Image (cartoon, rainbow, N blue to C red):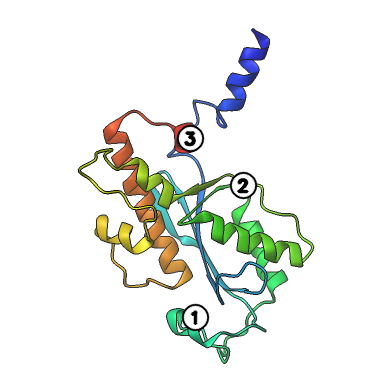
């Protein structure tokens, strides 16, 4: 019986009394020089706090990082130029400030594995411990809201643009780290609302 209880506890990450609403989520996005984990670098980290169904714009994090790497092709997408005149922190300083902002919050991102791996590679380079935060991915969560039917063709990958279009979210600040984090946060709230319409959900069920 003791063993069964142990496994029961392990299966649920959170105490059942902890609600989705009261959990501190940090919704984040990174803008990078490209998609190679080894050679590319983070240009900007944008993140905001989501708690009690509220996106707290005042409590946001936006950090442009000093660059040695520069790629003309990706710079055109997010408009971050090497000649940016604002004084920017080093990668180490930016990461230290980001970790302080993040704390032990649950991370939400769109295609989370990319952002978290880019951040972890940067942490590794700077001799800092890797992230241990739990993560949620709006690309995966969105699929849970879709009806399973042979009449309805599901895509393998849903982009942030797909979610913005589906939920009628403004794309005014798309392709800035903080702008994309904001779109992701609204999409997350809409996904949770849709999941609650389908069945009773709790914090643990988001991770399954």
**Left or right, 38 with reference to 186:** right
**Residue on which disc 1 sits:** 74
Secondary element at image label 2:
loop
**Residue on which disc 2 sits:** 133
Mark 1 / mark 3, whichever is N-terminal: 1
Query: Residue 162, how many percent across, how many down?
Result: 31, 60
**Left or right, 113 with reference to 120:** left
Mark 3 Cα within 10 Å, few/some/many (few <14, many 20+)?
few
Q: CA distance from mark 2 to mark 1?
A: 29 Å
Secondary element at image label 3:
loop
| Residue furthest to the right | 127
Q: CA distance from mark 1 to mark 3?
A: 35 Å
Do callouts 2 and 1 mark residues in contact (Cβ within 8 Å)?
A: no
Nearer to the camera, 66 or 150: 150
Query: Residue 164, how many percent across, how many down?
Result: 30, 60
**Left or right, 80 with reference to 187:** right
Please give the label number shown on residue 208.
Answer: 3
Q: Quadrant of residue 63?
A: bottom right
């Amino acid at each position: 019986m003791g063993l069964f209880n142990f496994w029961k506890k392990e299966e649920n990450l959170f105490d059942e009394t902890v609600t989705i609403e009261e959990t501190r989520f940090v919704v984040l996005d990174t803008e990078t020089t490209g998609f190679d984990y080894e050679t590319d670098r983070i240009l900007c980290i944008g993140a905001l706090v989501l708690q009690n169904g509220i996106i707290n714009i005042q409590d946001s994090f936006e950090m442009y990082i000093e660059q040695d790497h520069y790629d003309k092709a990706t710079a055109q997408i997010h408009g971050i130029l090497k000649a940016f005149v604002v004084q920017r922190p080093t990668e180490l300083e930016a990461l230290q400030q980001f970790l302080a902002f993040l704390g032990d919050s649950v991370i939400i991102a769109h295609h989370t594995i990319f952002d978290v791996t880019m951040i972890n590679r940067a942490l590794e380079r700077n001799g800092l411990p890797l992230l241990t935060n739990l993560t949620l991915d709006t690309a995966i969560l969105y699929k849970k809201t879709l009806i399973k039917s042979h009449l309805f063709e599901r895509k393998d990958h849903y982009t942030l643009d797909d979610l913005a279009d589906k939920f009628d979210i403004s794309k005014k600040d798309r392709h800035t780290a903080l702008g994309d984090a904001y779109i992701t946060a609204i999409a997350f709230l809409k996904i949770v609302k849709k999941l609650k319409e389908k069945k009773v959900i709790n914090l643990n069920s988001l991770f399954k």
